[in-house]
Structures are given as C-alpha cells and as structure tokens.
C-alpha cells in the first residue's frame, strides 16, 4: 500500500494517531500526555518506515519530525503543539 493510502486508512479509523519512533523522547512525552488525559490513541512506530510515511508527511504537511500527531484526521503538530494546546480533550470530543 502506498504511504498516502496507509495514512488515509489510519486517519479514517482512529481519532488520534501518533506517528512515532520508539526511541524518540518527544514521542514518549506525547504518548504519556495522551495517556494522562485518558485519551485512546493509535501509536504507529515508524522506526524502519518501509512505506515512507515520514517522507510523505514531510511533503504533504511540511512536518519533518516525529511525533506527528493527528486528531480528527488533521495534523495538530508535534509534541510541543500537544503540550501547549489548551484543550485537547475538547478538540478530541468535538463532533463537527
Ligand atoms: N519540536 C518537535 C521536536 C521533535 C523532534 O526533534 N523529534 C526528533 C526525534 S526525537 C526527530 O524527528 N528527528 C528527526 C528524525 O527522526 O527523522 C516536537 O515537539 O515534536
């Protein structure tokens, strides 16, 4: 499957998707923050990244680092954006 299709499928099936690398401290902090907020999320570890998801995200969203955090299929940003956001739970629970 192409990176575009893979990402589209992940985003359509999960409200929160964290594109991550297992060794990355910013990814760990982001996942911990979501856990603290009791939010369910899918973490996709792209340490080897055979489908080229990171390059696809860089080209499509101009976001070159991990984590890349998507909420309701939109890129929120990285860990710093997650930590700075005033109301992640509200954003996640938004229905429109
Ligand atoms: N400001 C970013 C920093 C993220 C960052 O520097 N991530 C590193 C890994 S810990 C990265 O993506 N390095 C390039 C790479 O792994 O391709 C954030 O808060 O998410």
Image: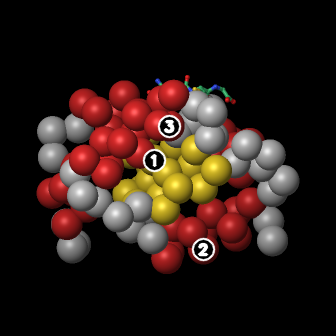
Label 3's element? helix
Pointer 3 residue Cβ closer than 8 Å to ligand 1: yes
Q: Residues within 10 Å of mark 3 (few under 14, many from 20)?
A: many
Q: Quadrant of residue 3?
A: bottom right
Pointer 2 residue Cβ closer than 8 Å to ligand 1: no
Label 2's element? helix
From the image, tell me which residue sits under label 1. Answer: 69
Label 1's element? strand
Q: Is residue 50 left or right of residue 74?
A: right
Q: Quadrant of the N terminus?
A: bottom right
Relative image position of residue 83 (x, y in whole percent): 28, 33
The residue most toward the right is 50
Relative image position of residue 50 (x, y in whole percent): 84, 53
Q: Quadrant of residue 51?
A: bottom right
The residue lying at 19 percent from left, 66 percent from top is 94
Q: Are marks 1 and 3 in contact (CB under 8 Å)?
A: no
Q: Relative to 93, is 26 above or below?
A: above
Between 19 and 75, the one lying in front of the other is 19
From the image, tell me which residue sits under label 3. Answer: 27
Residue 35, numbered circle: none
The residue lying at 64 percent from left, 50 percent from top is 45
N-terminal-most mark, 3 or 2: 2
Q: Relative to 29, is 44 above or below?
A: below
Q: Is residue 7 left or right of residue 96?
A: right
Between 10 and 21, the one lying in front of the other is 21
Residue 29 visible (yes or no): yes
Q: CA distance from mark 1 to mark 2?
A: 15 Å
From the image, tell me which residue sits under label 2. Answer: 9
């Amino acid at each position: 499957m192409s990176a575009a299709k893979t990402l589209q499928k992940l985003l359509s099936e999960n409200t929160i998707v964290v594109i991550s690398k297992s060794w990355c401290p910013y990814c760990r902090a982001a996942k911990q923050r979501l856990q603290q907020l009791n939010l369910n999320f899918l973490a996709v570890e792209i340490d080897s990244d055979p489908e080229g998801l990171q390059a696809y995200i860089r080209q499509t969203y101009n976001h070159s680092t991990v984590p890349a955090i998507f909420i309701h299929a939109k890129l929120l940003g990285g860990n710093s954006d997650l930590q700075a956001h005033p109301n992640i739970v509200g954003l996640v629970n938004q229905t429109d």
